[in-house]
Image (cartoon, rainbow, N blue to C red):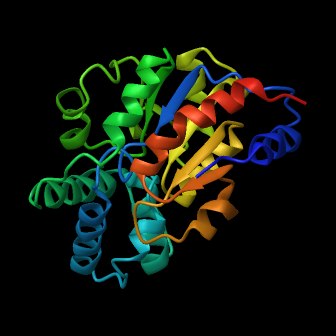
């Protein structure tokens, strides 16, 4: 697979950027670094079923990137025409997190380590940008991806007022990395995350690691879509080189 120059040039024209200078990688966690979205969907579906709220397991893949509070408010407004109270959010999100930890352990996504190694080799700053606040995976990052992130380069649900699809998580990540939007690449796998990163102005790479079709990722604002994390990792050197070399 060759990456067309038109992908970069079209993005530059849409954003009115003269050139891209990728200095930072802003990277999602669930479904991107970890093959975890199936477990999250199962945990949310189990919780909503216990609450008597009609849902499907598949719909929770579309909610990926939302904070726990946002997902609970979505469910409560559907069932009860109101937001969940702070106490309900705390108690129910803790229950959902417990269900998640009781499921089979998730594994790093194939290709994720190769991607992170490339970013380290070219000295790109790396910021984790996740809608999750669950420590069960966040605390595994150093073990599974040693040296990839430092604690001061992580944006979680606890660090923002507005989660994905709002651009705040990626704006905050850019501030942490001390880069402008034209200097950032975002790696995402779900429409809400893609919309968040794209709205923040980052060149957004989407990866189809679940049941969401690539068309949904393109509609959300992805500049390019890869079919797997392995393909993404394989093509990143070519992509970054083109980003540095093309200008309008």
| Quarter of image, res 73 | bottom left
Residue at 35% over, 23% down: 149
In the visual, does 139 lie left or right of 241? left
Q: Is residue 193 visible?
A: no
From the viewer's perspective, is residue 10 above or below residue 45? above
From the viewer's perspective, is residue 181 above or below residue 213? above
Q: Is residue 73 visible?
A: yes
From the viewer's perspective, is residue 168 above or below residue 74? above
- Counting the numbered discs, the total is 0
In the visual, does 168 lie left or right of 101? right
Quarter containing the C terminus? top right
In the visual, does 97 lie left or right of 102? right
Residue at 30% over, 49% down: 109
Residue 202: percent from the left, percent from the top? 67, 36
Residue at 51% over, 19% down: 124
Residue at 33% over, 55% down: 89
| Quarter of image, res 139 | top left
Residue 72: percent from the left, percent from the top? 39, 62
From the viewer's perspective, is residue 193 above or below residue 103? above
């Amino acid at each position: 697979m060759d990456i067309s120059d038109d992908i970069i040039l079209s993005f530059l024209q849409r954003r009115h950027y003269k050139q891209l200078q990728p200095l930072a990688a802003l990277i999602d966690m669930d479904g991107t670094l970890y093959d975890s979205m199936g477990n999250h969907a199962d945990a949310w579906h189990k919780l909503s079923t216990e609450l008597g709220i009609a849902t499907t397991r598949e719909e929770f893949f579309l909610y990926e990137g939302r904070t726990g509070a946002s997902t609970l408010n979505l469910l409560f407004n559907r069932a009860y025409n109101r937001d969940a109270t702070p106490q309900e959010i705390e108690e129910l999100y803790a229950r959902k997190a417990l269900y998640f930890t009781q499921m089979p352990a998730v594994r790093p996504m194939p290709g994720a380590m190769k991607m992170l190694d490339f970013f380290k080799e070219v000295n790109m700053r790396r910021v984790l940008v996740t809608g999750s606040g669950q420590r069960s995976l966040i605390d595994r990052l150093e073990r599974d991806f040693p040296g990839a992130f430092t604690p001061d380069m992580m944006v979680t649900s606890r660090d923002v007022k507005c989660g994905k699809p709002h651009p705040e998580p990626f704006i905050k990540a850019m501030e942490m990395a001390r880069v402008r939007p034209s200097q950032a690449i975002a790696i995402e796998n779900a429409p809400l995350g893609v919309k968040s990163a794209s709205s923040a102005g980052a060149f957004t790479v989407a990866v189809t690691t679940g049941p969401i079709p690539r068309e949904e990722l393109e509609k959300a604002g992805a500049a390019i879509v890869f079919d797997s994390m392995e393909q993404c990792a394989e093509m990143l050197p070519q992509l970054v080189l083109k980003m540095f070399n093309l200008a309008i």
